[in-house]
Image (cartoon, helix red, strand yellow):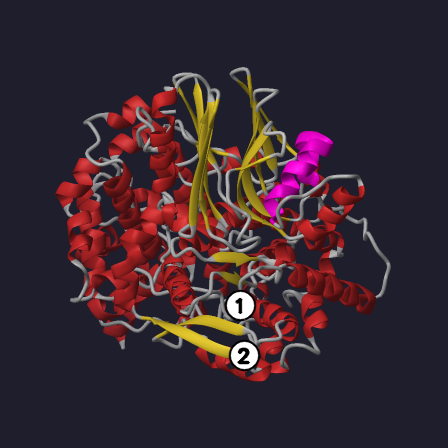
């Protein structure tokens, strides 16, 4: 796990190349505190910061092939590197190191750019093919590892994080207002767009070739589901659960491959409990587990975490996250995420990674991904219930089920069926919309746009983020089961755009901690996609087949517990008397006016409302956290924009 | 001429759901739900306000869009409630 950076093209003076690469990699030193290296070739350069996990003694990077023709800078892990190495050795390849990095070099020599299809791992890499004068970039299927790029004056630059690109002379941070609109609708920008105008992200499961001043980008893998009505299998549930468990066990086993100890997150939910249960017997020295706890029962899962740790006999450490910890860390968190967010949930995970690092660990397994591929999120249940209500729109009984769906939202418990039906958009006319499953979330989120400034609104015009998302859906999408459609949107969009980045790689790598995600092994993702929808979401019971697979491994009380989504205290973290001074500075009318993105008097009222009593509603909290993080983003990256800058940067 | 009830309701909505944005075209018939001015928590804020401001009791069954989804509907609903308590 590491950070990479580099360039190709004629715009870098050979005399300046080393200094440039040192600057770029220096900006992402947190990703790789163990080692650093650069390689300067003719019109190309690669830089690397290393977090040593595999092949510690001989895995220095950038790494060149024996003949010197190829050079790679690699971030991530190839979990099947042992099997690939064996197969390549049988074909006569001679390896000089024990690292997984070298396997990619040999595999590229063997089959070229399509080598990525053979890799089972989480990766982002750049490979310079000197004889062909071609730079290849690639990113893992699910989007675990980040990779950004930009053209500047005919030269192509890339890096694991945007902050490295901002050290290139002439590349500057300018806000892309469309990206902000996307975040305030969908929680994340639609890749390849980023918050930075002119800086793009390589989308997950894509490879990019830069050759002769031209780029080609193409997907090498796609998430696909069977057509609606095609059950895919008639096998009994028990068989499917058994195969699921075998696959998950193997996905966990190969993710324990490392030359350093591997720990595990333990949230108290089924997913990380199951991963820890599968990992524990495979760690002879005893599995170490880590978690975060909160002050209030509304957020805290400490009792379940301790129960699971005792059940497995792991040595467990927890970091207590208090409201002021969220406020204290938030500016750093925004700097690492490099994008605004509408929730504070990344902050506790930032603190958790810090704990892991303090305890001497740099690799952890997590349960992330299970909710996407086995339909665990409330959104999937909500969408099914909305369809159920829409079939009988006059029913006053059906909408009362929404209360059961969100027992942790006090605002819903007292609502009448008429209001529940109105809030959850159960109109039958909307059923054909491809984004039907996401309507309430998008609508509640977009309500926070009421705080946009007149200037920003004018710049955005009639732009509609949801329309852009819908336009990019694959052709087969309309033939899939509604549950699969909703899963596709979550898995291919929110997972890489928010969960794996803002709540994943970026906050973990801030402390040099690598997360590994057994549920996101592509073999398991493909297998799960073929499981009939009703085995995943059985009635309104989420992750049904996964629970079956977990039944001898995880205590029944954890399997049976109501799902508690991972959440953290929102606006109240920033509004107490102990709040750090940056909060009022960032949200002051002067600061809001200077950034020009939000309506200063309205923001002032929002802050006052939160000061009077804790904000309970989603819209108010999302707006508050979204505005604060946007202001912090501007402060960190795009300070003092010139007047009228939005008009100049309109896409 | 707006009644004092209507004026108070409008002021509450502008302050709490529009954050003081006077430029918003909020007519008596503007739907609070369709225009995303109110969410499930907002309904409860509204009900609490009405109960406290006008000293009325609102039964759970009365918390429906037909009574509360626009200034005109809230005004009519509150006035009916006030009439009930005056008659009682």
Picture layout, residue B69 above or below residue A540: above
* Furthest residue in direction left, as rendered: A590
**Earlier-in-chain disc, 1 versus 2:** 1
Q: Which of the two residues, B50 or A606, is positioned nearer the viewer here?
A: A606
Q: Chain of mark 2?
A: A
Q: Which of the two residues, A125 or A258, is positioned nearer the viewer here?
A: A258
Q: Is residue A516 left or right of residue A51?
A: right
The image quadrant that residue A11 belongs to is top left
Q: What residue is rendered at 68% in x and 72% in y?
A: A550
Residue B52 lies, in percent from the top left, at 22, 70
Q: Are marks 1 and 2 in contact (CB under 8 Å)?
A: yes
Residue hosting label 1:
A264
Q: Where does the C terminus of chain A fall, quadrant-wise? A: top left
Residue hosting label 2:
A314
Q: Residues within 10 Å of mark 2 (few under 14, many from 20)?
A: many
Q: Residues within 10 Å of mark 1 (few under 14, many from 20)?
A: many
Residue A34 lies, in percent from the top left, at 42, 52
Q: Inspect this view and state whether residue A137 appears.
A: yes
Picture layout, residue A26 above or below residue A461: below
Q: What residue is rendered at 59% in x and 41% in y?
A: A433
Q: Is residue A23 left or right of residue A40?
A: left
Q: What residue is rendered at 59% in x and 64% in y?
A: A398
- Magenta-tinted stretch: A99-117
Residue A93 lies, in percent from the top left, at 73, 39
Q: Any mark on residue A223, and which?
A: none
Both on one chain, marks 1 and 2? yes
């Amino acid at each position: 796990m590491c950070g990479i950076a580099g360039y190709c093209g004629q715009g870098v003076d050979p005399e300046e190349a080393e200094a440039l690469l040192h600057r770029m990699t220096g900006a992402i030193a947190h990703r790789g505190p163990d080692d650093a290296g650069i390689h300067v070739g003719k019109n190309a350069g690669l830089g690397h910061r290393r977090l040593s996990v595999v092949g510690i003694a001989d895995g220095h990077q950038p790494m060149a092939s024996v003949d010197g023709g190829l050079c790679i800078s690699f971030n991530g892990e190839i979990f099947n590197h042992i099997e690939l190495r064996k197969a390549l050795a049988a074909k006569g390849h001679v390896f000089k190191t024990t690292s997984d990095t070298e396997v990619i070099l040999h595999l590229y020599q063997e089959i070229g750019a399509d080598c990525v299809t053979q890799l089972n791992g989480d990766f982002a890499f750049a490979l310079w093919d000197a004889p062909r004068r071609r730079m290849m970039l690639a990113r893992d299927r699910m989007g675990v590892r980040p990779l950004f790029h930009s053209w500047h004056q005919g030269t192509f630059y890339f890096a694991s994080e945007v902050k490295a690109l901002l050290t290139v002379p002439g590349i500057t941070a300018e806000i892309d207002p469309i990206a902000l609109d996307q975040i305030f609708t969908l929680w994340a920008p639609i890749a390849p767009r980023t918050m930075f105008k002119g800086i793009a992200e390589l989308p997950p499961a894509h490879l990019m070739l830069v050759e002769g001043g031209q780029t080609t980008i193409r997907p090498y893998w796609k998430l696909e589901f069977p057509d609606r009505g095609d059950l895919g299998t008639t096998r009994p549930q028990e068989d499917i659960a058994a195969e699921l468990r075998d696959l998950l066990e193997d996905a966990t086993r190969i993710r324990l491959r490392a030359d350093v100890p591997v720990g595990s997150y333990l949230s108290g939910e089924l997913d990380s409990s199951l991963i820890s249960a599968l990992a524990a017997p495979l760690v002879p020295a005893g599995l170490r587990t880590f978690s975060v706890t909160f002050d209030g029962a509304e957020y805290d899962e400490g009792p379940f975490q301790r129960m699971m740790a005792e059940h497995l006999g792991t040595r467990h450490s927890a970091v207590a996250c208090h409201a002021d910890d969220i406020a204290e860390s938030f500016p750093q968190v925004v700097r690492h995420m490099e994008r605004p967010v509408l929730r504070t949930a990344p902050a506790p995970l930032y603190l958790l990674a810090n704990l892991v690092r303090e305890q001497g660990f740099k690799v952890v397994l997590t349960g992330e991904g299970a909710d996407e591929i086995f339909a665990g999120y409330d959104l999937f249940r909500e969408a099914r219930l909305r369809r159920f209500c829409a079939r009988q729109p006059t029913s006053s009984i059906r909408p009362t089920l929404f209360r059961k769906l969100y027992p942790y939202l006090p605002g819903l418990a007292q609502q009448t069926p008429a209001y529940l039906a109105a809030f959850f958009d159960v109109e039958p006319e909307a059923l054909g919309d491809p984004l039907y499953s996401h309507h309430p979330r998008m609508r509640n989120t977009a309500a926070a746009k009421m705080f946009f400034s007149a200037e920003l609104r004018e710049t955005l015009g009639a732009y509609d983020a949801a329309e852009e998302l819908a336009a990019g859906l694959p052709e087969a999408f309309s033939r899939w089961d509604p549950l699969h459609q909703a899963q596709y949107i979550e898995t291919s969009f929110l997972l890489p755009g928010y969960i794996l980045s803002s709540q994943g790689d970026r906050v973990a790598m801030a402390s040099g901690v690598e997360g590994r995600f057994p549920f996101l092994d592509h073999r398991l993702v493909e297998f799960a996609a073929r499981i009939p929808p009703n085995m995943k979401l059985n009635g309104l019971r989420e992750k049904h087949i996964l629970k079956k697979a977990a039944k001898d491994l995880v205590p029944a009380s954890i399997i049976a517990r109501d799902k508690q989504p991972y959440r953290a205290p929102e606006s109240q973290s920033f509004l107490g008397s102990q709040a750090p001074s940056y909060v009022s500075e960032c949200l002051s009318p002067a600061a809001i006016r200077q950034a020009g993105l939000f309506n200063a008097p309205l923001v002032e009222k929002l802050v006052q409302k939160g000061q009077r009593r804790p904000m309970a509603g989603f819209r108010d909290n999302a707006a508050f956290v979204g505005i604060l993080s946007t202001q912090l983003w501007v402060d960190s990256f795009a300070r003092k924009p010139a007047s009228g800058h939005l008009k100049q940067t309109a896409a | 001429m707006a009644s004092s009830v209507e004026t108070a309701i409008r002021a509450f909505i502008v302050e709490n759901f529009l954050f003081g944005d006077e430029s918003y075209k909020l007519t008596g018939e503007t739907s609070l739900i369709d225009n995303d001015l109110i969410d499930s928590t907002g309904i409860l804020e509204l009900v609490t306000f009405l109960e406290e401001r006008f000293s009325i009791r609102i039964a759970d069954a009365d918390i429906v869009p037909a009574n509360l989804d626009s200034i005109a509907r809230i005004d009519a609903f509150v006035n009916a409630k006030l009439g009930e308590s005056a008659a009682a």
